[in-house]
Image (tube, helix red, strand yellow):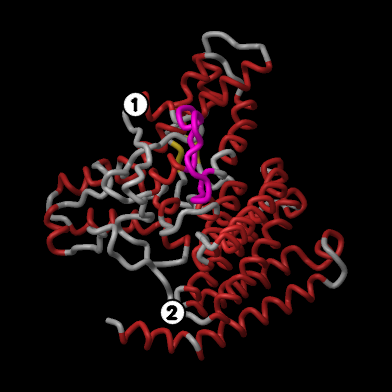
Amino acid sequence: MEQYGKILLIAMPVFLLLVIGEKIYGYIKGNDTVEFMDMISSLSSGITNIVKDVLGLSVTVLAYSWLVNHIAVFHIESGFWVVFIAFIALDFHGYWVHRLSHEINLFWNKHAIHHSSEEFNLACALRQSVSSFVNLFTIFLLPAALLGIPSEVIATIAPLHLFAQFWYHTRHIDKMGFLEKIIVTPSHHRVHHAINPEYMDKNHGQIFIVWDKLFGTFQSEREDIKPVYGISRPAHTWNPIRINFQHLWLLCRDAWMTGNYLDKFRIWFMPTGWRPSDVEKEHPVQKIEDVYHFEKYSSAVSTKLKYWSGIQLIVVFIFTLFFFGHIKLIGTPAIFYYGLYVFLSVYAFTELMDGKPGAFFWEILKTLTGFALLYILNGKFLVNNLMYGSEYLIVFYLVFSCLTSWWFSRFELSKVQVSQHSFQ
């Protein structure tokens, strides 16, 4: 937990600078692929995901260390080969986990957030799940376990393998020659994120594209078919926490409402998107039928609110960096209160981005949690580990943020509601 937090102290600022750099580059080139509100939503999703991971809010049903201890045929000693095999094994594991997440209803819930952006850029790479609480797929690391690859090596390589998947989420890099035959490139991954019928559920590879070619899921990007991004059942929200549970909520609702008892059970394991026929007929949900003619999600908010959302993201980003740098000092159970504060912060300001009337309620909860966290940590902790007077600065921020949220809710969101109503 603490070691992963230290890695993120370096990785988070680097990713943020690259996201901002892509936006600046696109603006200069006249091809800005980073829509501001979408970027804020994506970065917010990344924050919630890494906080959840650092807190360890998931359970592994079959631990890799157990596999190594019980089924290893022999142990590879060479440092190079241990690292090399671990990386290949993680990529094989990643391909199958990724593929099953696309093909089975239940598992799609944890992956839908990653595809929910209707843009394709570096920021959307950070849209990662907070809804995955149980890891069922350690079995795909069986090849590494048979070769006796130590669990410590897998744990070290896994974050590097994940970070290496960031760079190819961009529209600014065209096809890359012979590398297209070996590794996952931006061109390959644009296909993967597309909802065009010709591209759906293709290119599940994470680092090496050879798995897709080997197991029949490869599709090259065609010049005559421009990729269209998103999910076929649009999220219609900037709130990453809502997006994380939308599909699961639909499954639960469908399982409850269907009159067919077999469907109540099998809905979870059917192909992604499958719904019981009686529920689909009586309770249809919006689905994009023509990928070339649909309106991208956009909330009718002012420029002031957009800037305020950016400020809120920066503040949460700073709080998260402080958290990762002081996990051990904060200690248990305070780290979980801290995590709750981060989640409430993201929920509150992204609800405001959506123009939701209940946004101020979540801001109040966030503010109260912030004051409770200040009390738990006490001023001395902050003075010793941040700066003198920091507790007063935080109190000022909490009060100012709450009042600003109230102002937007009182004087702007009412206009948004009228604007939205007029188009219905």
Q: Which mark is residue 300?
A: 2
- Pick the front one: 308 or 274: 308
Earlier along the polypeptide chain: callout 2 or callout 1?
Answer: 1
Counting from the top left corner in percent of width and height, residue 266 is at: 21, 43
Specify the amino acid type for callout 1: Phe
Gap between marks 2 and 1 measured at Cα: 44 Å
Secondary element type, mark 1: helix
Can you say whether 285 is above or below 180 in the image?
Answer: below
* Displayed quadrant of residue 29: bottom right
Secondary structure that dominates the magenta span = loop
**271 is higher (above) or lower (below) than 252:** above
Mark 2 surroundings within 10 Å by alpha-carbon count, few (fewer than 14), some (14 through 19), many (20 or more): some
Q: Amino acid at mark 2?
A: Ala
Residue situated in front as seen by the camera: 280 or 176: 176
Q: Position of residue 323 (x, y in %)?
A: 70, 56
Is 184 within the magenta? Answer: yes
Q: Quadrant of residue 167?
A: top right
Relative side of 70 to 228, left or right: right
Q: Position of residue 394 (x, y in %)?
A: 74, 73
**Residue under label 1:** 215
Residue located at (33% from left, 68% from top): 295
**Residue at x-position 26% and y-position 59%:** 288
